[in-house]
Amino acid sequence: MGPKLEADSLTRIVDGDPIVNSVSLRVRESTVVAIVGSSGSGKSSFLRLLNRLDEPTAGTVYLDGTDYREIDPQTVRRRIGLIPQDAALSRGTVFENVSLGARMRDEPIDGVRVGALLERMGLEGYEDRPVEELSGGERQRVSIARTLYVEPEVLLLDEPTAHLDTAIEAQIEDLLAELIREESLTCVLVTHDTAQARRLGQRIVEFDDGRIVAEGTPEEVLE
Amino acid sequence: MTDAALETFVEQATDPVILTGFVQIIVATALAAIVLGVVYARNLDFGREAVTTSGRGLIQVVAAGAVIGVLLAAHLAWATVVLAFMICVGGWISHKRGGAIPGVFRTSVISIGFGAGLVIVMMTLAGAIETTMRDLIVIGSMIIANAMKTNSLVLDRFTGELASNRAEIEAMLSVGGSPEQAINQYVSTSVYASIIPILDSIKSLGIVQIPGLMAGMIIAGSNPIYAAQYQFVIMLMIFAAGGLTVVINTILISRRVFTDAKQLDGDVLEEIDV
């Protein structure tokens, strides 16, 4: 069986500087690939290319064997969901944010699904709360629920615990670990924390200067 | 320039009232000089700017008066040319507020042209603007100038909203939203912010301010109630022209801040930040 997601010589050049340089990577279904590397190594830029929030200068991405340039970008982003570093919630209530995917596509909102996701995130009964009143950890939980609501086939996580304090970081990481295990999610996780990469990733990829410099199991790369 | 227009211009330029006007300018200048004296005495920095701005304003307004004098005697068809010129200049001045957006000069001219043009045509057909050079130029320029100001405000706010809400917009794109949906709330905020000054002017009409046109009509001996009614019509015309301008322009520019692959255009955002 082919990979669920495949980056083929993916490159992005900004002002003459290759921030992602000919990166090829295969992600099999129901596996978690963790990308580690120092700040500015191109990890997050690579993730934005996978979700097509930025345009590759060269190379492409295959989703189930189909070149993603042949798929409408809105559909690509729905199938490859991104949980950003900053929760980036919109003004409004928790319910409105979690159901954003449906509202963006003028689809009927599944209130039961919103409730179930909030319960799963430990935010039961938060539906009507304005997002301005939430703590950092609660905001990130809403952001995760917002992405999961659209049932993406691949989940991209861009340093999902980077802005949280240690106790909340552990809670969010446990939540993600549970979700990944129970839902058999296919994920690409970007993190600067090698311990987190080891805990969540089945394969580890190390980035430096926009390139992959090491790839393998956690033991092979991190020890 | 036709002989009739030239004759009218010479007649107006030699009118004794021009001399009276200059005497009045001298008195007003004396009052402004008091302000300048205070500015210099307190070492405030804008004395030079106040002098040059006043001088420039005097030259501009006298020149405009002379040009209007000539135009009033010209054929009515020239009104279209003059108003079109004003729309282009209005588009040029206001487009700089959103200079980072590709093609914003063209969208501004189209929007001001549509917003102000439609209102001028409709109100002329309705009889609120007389089909004379005097009414078309004076009232038309008032409508165009206000549409230009509203356009400047919407461009300034829209680019600010884009820059400060990039993460939120991309979060909406990330769950499958279209570019139009992703920036919809920021477009609404920008449109509303741009028409606040007009709304406030209408709210304060007759209470905080007696607008120039109404004051002028009363001074010229018109019935104050009719002057007030006409001023209200003018305010609504300004509101309609400004509102149409910003609605059209936000529709046009919204498409230009995204790439063909429905991504926020990084070059535009970088230019806004600069």
Image: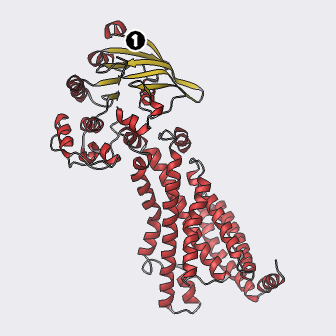
* Count of numbered circles on the image: 1
Report the chain holding disc 1.
Answer: A
- Where residue B71 appears, x then y in whole percent? 73, 78
Taking the image as drawn, is residue B216 in sight? yes
The chosen color scheme is: secondary structure
Q: Picture quarter containing residue A15?
A: top right
Using the image, determine if residue A164 lies above or below residue A131.
above
Using the image, determine if residue A89 lies above or below residue B202.
above
Using the image, determine if residue B113 lies above or below residue A17.
below
Residue B237 is left or right of residue A114, and the answer is right
- Where residue B158 appears, x then y in whole percent? 48, 52
Q: Which residue lies furthest to the right in this view?
A: B3
Taking the image as drawn, is residue A36 in sight? no
- Where residue B125 appears, x then y in whole percent? 57, 81
Mark 1: amino acid: Glu
In terms of secondary structure, where does tag 1 sit?
strand
- Quadrant (top left/top right/bottom left/bottom right) for the C terminus of chain A: top left
Residue A19 is left or right of residue B181, and the answer is right
- Quadrant (top left/top right/bottom left/bottom right) for the N terminus of chain A: top left
- Where residue B129 appears, x then y in whole percent? 58, 82
Residue pointed to by mark 1: A215
Using the image, determine if residue B19 lies above or below residue B148.
below
Residue A4 is left or right of residue B155, and the answer is left
Residue at point 70%, 68% (across, down): B55
Pick the residue in front: B226 or B119: B119
Category of crowding for the residue at label 1, using alpha-carbon neighbours closer than 10 angstroms: few (below 14), some (14–19), many (at least 20)? some
Residue A216 is left or right of residue A30, and the answer is right
